[in-house]
Amino acid sequence: MIYTVTFNPSLDYIVSVDNFTLGKVNRTTDELMFPGGKGINVSMVLKNLGYDSVALGFMAGFTGNEIIRMLDERGVISDFIHVEKGLSRINVKLRSNEESEINGQGPAIDADAISRLYGKLDKLQDGDVLVLAGSIPDVMSRNTYMDIMKRLNGRGVKVVVDATKDLLVNVLEYKPFLVKPNNHELGEIYGVTLNTRDEVVPYAKRMQEAGARNVLISMAGEGAVLLDEQGEVHMSEAPKGKVVNSVGAGDSMVAGFIAGYLESGNYEEAFYMGLCTGSASAFSENLATKAEVIKLRETL
C-alpha cells in the first residue's frame, strides 16, 4: 500500500480578483476550494492515476472534518488523527495582477498525537511506499522526518521525501527511495544557483552520494532531471502547454513517478510519467487526470 503523510493539511481557498486593491472592498470573479497539503495532493493524484493510498496526518475542528469529507468525495482513503486544540488551517491563494498567499497556522499537535501517528507508521511493512511531503509545524521537532526513517529503517519500506533544507538533508543517511527537491531548493542546500538541467546534475550526484537512492529534480518550465540508483541520468524539457496553476505540480510529479514505477518497474518510464503528471497539473485548474497525463506522455 502507498501511504502519504501531511502534517499540516489545509483547505485551499483560491480566489480570483480583477485588479486587487489594498484598502478597498474587492469582489471575486472566481472561487475554488480544495483539500490541500503536499501529501494530500500526492494521494489525490495517485487516485486519479488509478492507485489507492492512505492519507495520514493530523486534523482538527470543522475545517478538518471538511477536508476529510472532500477526500471521501474524491475516493481518497484517509486515516487522520484528530487533535483537540485549534483548527486545520485555511490557506488563501489570491490571483490578481500578482499571485499572493496567506497560509494559516494549523492546530496544536501534542506528544500523544505524534505517538499515535508513529503507531500507525510502525505497521508499515516490506513493499509499502511512504511519502513524507511538506513542512513540519513549529510545534514538532525538526528531526521528525529523520526519526520516522530511523524507525522504518531495514523494513523494506520505500520512503519518498519531498521537503527542503535540513528536513531533506537529515534523512539522506537512511537511504530514501526517492527525494524530489526543485532546482532552487537543491541550489539552496549547496549554496549555488542552478538554472539549467546540466547544472543540477553534479549536485544531484552529491545528494545521491550522501545516501538518496534516486534524485528527481523538478525545474518548472525547464523540465526535470532524474539520477537513478542504476547510475543513469535522465533529463527532459517540459511538455508544451500553458501554465494555469502551479500549485500541486511538484506533488503531482511525485505521484506520477510512483505510479510510473509501480506500473513498469522502470526508472525512465517513471521519470516521464512524473514529468507529464506534474505538467498536466500545471496546465489545469485542477490536479492532473489520467487522460491528461497520457495525452502529454504521447508528446515525449
Image (cartoon, rainbow, N blue to C red):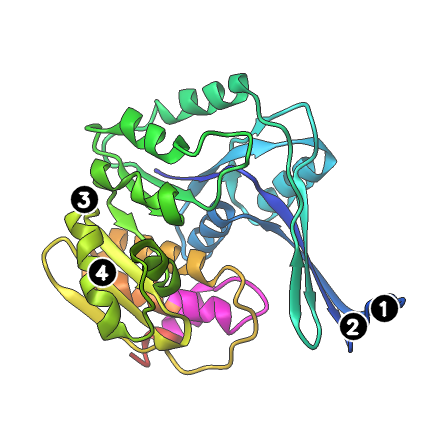
* 2 or 4: tag closer to the N-terminus: 2
* Type of amino acid under label 3: Gly
What is the number of the mark on residue 20?
Answer: 2
Mark 2 to mark 1: distance in Å?
A: 6 Å
> Which quadrant: the C terminus?
bottom left
* 1 or 3: tag closer to the N-terminus: 1
Magenta-drawn stretch contains 289: yes
Which is more toward the observer, 194 or 255? 194
Mark 1 Cα shell of 10 Å, populated few (<14), some (14-19), many (≥20): few
- Mark 1 element type: loop
* Type of amino acid under label 4: Tyr
Q: Which residue is mark 4?
A: 203
- Mark 2 element type: loop
Q: Position of residue 210 (x, y in %)?
A: 18, 46
What is the number of the mark on residue 211?
Answer: 3
* 2 or 1: tag closer to the N-terminus: 2
Seen in the picture, residue 126 relative to 259 is either above or below; the reply is: above
Q: Which residue is mark 1?
A: 26
Position of 199 with respect to 61 (left or right) is left
CB atoms of marks 2 and 1 within 8 Å:
yes
Which is more toward the observer, 226 or 105? 105
* 3 or 4: tag closer to the N-terminus: 4
Residue at left offset 18%, top offset 44%: 211
Residue 275, quarter of picture: bottom left
CB atoms of marks 1 and 4 within 8 Å:
no
* Type of amino acid under label 1: Asn
* 3 or 2: tag closer to the N-terminus: 2
Q: Which region of the structure is painted magenta?
A: 277-295
